[in-house]
Amino acid sequence: MLHELTICPNVDKQGRDASSAAYMFNDNEKDLDIIATYSDVSGTIRTCRVKMKDLSASWVVENPINVDKVQGSQVQVLKLKDTYQTSTPFQENVEQSTDDQQFQEGEILSHRQTYWSPVKFKRQILRQKRRDLRTAELVRQDKEVNKELQATEAIESLKNMDPVVKGKYSIWRKDFENPNADSTLKLMRDQIIMAKAYANIAFSKKQTVLYNSLLKQVMESLNVIGEANSDADLHPSSLDRAKAMGHALSVAKDELYNCFTVERKLQAMLVTTEDNLESQKKRSAFLIQLAAKTVPKPLHCLSLQLSADYYFHGYYQTKQEPYNEKLEDPSLYHYAIFSDNVLATSVVVNSTVLHANEPEKHVFHIVTDKLNFAAMKMWFLVNSPRNATIQVDNIDDFKWMNSSYCSVLRQLESVRIKDYYFKANHPSTLSDGADHLKYRNPKYLSILNHLRFYLPEVHPKLDKILFLDDDIVVQKDLTPLWDVDLKGMVNGAVETCKESFHRFDKYLNFSNPIIIENFNPNACGWAFGMNIFDLKEWRKRNITAIYHHWQDLNDDRTLWKLGTLPPGLITFYNLTHPLDRKWHVLGLGYDPALNRTEIENAAVIHYNGNYKPWLDLAVSKYQSYWSKYVSSGNYYLQRCNISE
């Protein structure tokens, strides 16, 4: 935009010859009166009087005059130009070139005389700096966006992985949180697989040198990997090793690569690996079952020490203990524990009494077998919990417990069951897999495991009783359970079904028409291990007879496998009242991914499964919940090197 400006005659004759308004006059000199003529937005011609100092520094004078030539009343008309708005492309290029100092010295002086002002020059420098900073910021942001995209792609790739894969990509492993935590390790393992494939091909083609080279590379890579489970566990030289292996594979590929041959070799390796994996699974299942049913040496020592002292001190001579009226008082809180494990039973009793508000009102009825009776008796003689009442019985003293009355005893004495358990060539052996292997555990042969179906016979004068397994820990006062309204039901238990898990079809054979006709496959299962039983209602409905009926029908084990939970589900079908889940949390004996908050808030925690807390198999992070209730500083525990 051009404006015509009229310079009035009151100019100072000491004015300087300069190319810009800001340069012509400095603050110490008198200013010029300027009459500016311009058109407003409506097109009307207007004039105004301004001072030269009021103009922006971006305005420059075209064809500047020597102010000394301005005489008297002579009026000089000048044209000023807004260089920010009217710069031509050539002028802009000149300005940028000036900022970059690409003009020669003479050209810079000539340009400066025409358009240059100090303020404008400084602004140009600042603008260039802002451009540079903005460019650097955009480059940095672009790099960050690329990194985020790469990380997102890696995470999505992991999400699309087969969730059945276990071990390496197990969701409770810490390195699962970082999708790149094992990238180098995975690369090296993949390289080893390819090196083995090429080595086999080289061997078949009698390329001995290449074959030996690849085997050497494989051995060196295996040595570097060692027992590593993530990149953090690898030796610092692992990257160099991976590069060396990559070079060896490149050489092998140039010499041996044939798509069909490599594909066939990898398929053969895959089949061999799957066979080995299946074999290892069977062996692992066998060893876990063996470890689960084997009595640890310290526990065996404990039982022997207690039994020896029981007979040495003559406690066996006391044929009958004095009558204790608490044992049959229905107003007290009665517990039933059937176990042959002294230490486990002591933890159940200790944890229950410790959290009881009124320990003197709690009565524990412990039943064990003849082999462990002396040890169990001796333990509670010297380690009786405060104020609580303890009764220890021998199952062999229950004369009504015989094969003519008890279906399960009659079945356990049959030749068929003996063959199932003790013949090495039976289909349930290791070659048949792990499905049947767990049922070879001796606990399924123990009548102690089935005694829970005879509670009214064991305690004929009680109205209610709380059944506890020996692999549980009590963390809260349990007395409110006696006040739970079972609504006419016999059994109060926590249901275990979530979505499609732990429903009746998991435990019963619904291909059998007897099962289909009588039960709903989607009926919810419940937990044996902490159950409140209404014995009055039990007797009224003759529950034991129901159990005998179904046990007889399952003589050939076609309705369910061995165990007590399936017959329990059948016996108490539509007779079980669901308790709040906080009363009983299960899974500490097989599931390492349980919610810690649920465990700590539960009244009872249950180590159901093979990983019992007194075994080396135990899940380490759950062991402390159990071990803190082991009698501290106990004489017998110290003698058998059992740590708390």
Image (spheres, rainbow, N blue to C red):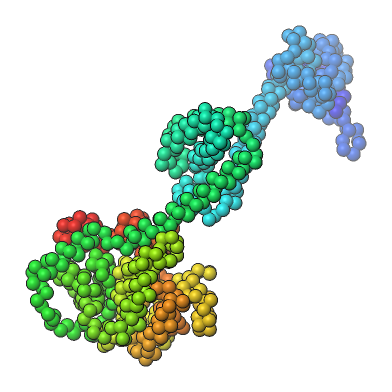
Asked whether 572 or 215 is in front, the reply is 215
At horizontal 22% and vertical 58% (from top left) the residue drawn is 298
Q: Position of residue 93 (x, y in %)?
A: 78, 21
Kindly tell me whether residue 631 is visible in this rendering: yes
At horizontal 33% and vertical 86% (from top left) the residue drawn is 535
Asked whether 614 or 398 is in front, the reply is 398
Tell me if 483 is positioned left or right of 384 in this view. Answer: right
Asked whether 247 or 465 is in front, the reply is 247
Q: Position of residue 397 (x, y in %)?
A: 21, 81
At horizontal 53% and vertical 84% (from top left) the residue drawn is 517
- Residue 618, compared with residue 584, is above or below; it is above
Asked whether 271 or 615 is in front, the reply is 271
Tell me if 19 is positioned left or right of 613 in this view. Answer: right
Q: Position of residue 225 (x, y in %)?
A: 44, 38
- Residue 445, compared with residue 74, is above or below; it is below
Quarter of the picture holding the C terminus: bottom left
Tell me if 400 is positioned left or right of 23 in this view. Answer: left
- Residue 286, compared with residue 234, is above or below; it is below
Kindly tell me whether residue 386 is visible in this rendering: no
Q: Quadrant of residue 265?
A: top right
Quarter of the picture holding the N terminus: top right
Q: Quadrant of residue 142?
A: top right
Q: Position of residue 467 (x, y in %)?
A: 32, 76
- Residue 589, compared with residue 15, is above or below; it is below
Judged from this view, the residue extending furthest toward the top is 106
At horizontal 24% and vertical 82% (from top left) the residue drawn is 398
Tell me if 486 is positioned left or right of 136 in this view. Answer: left
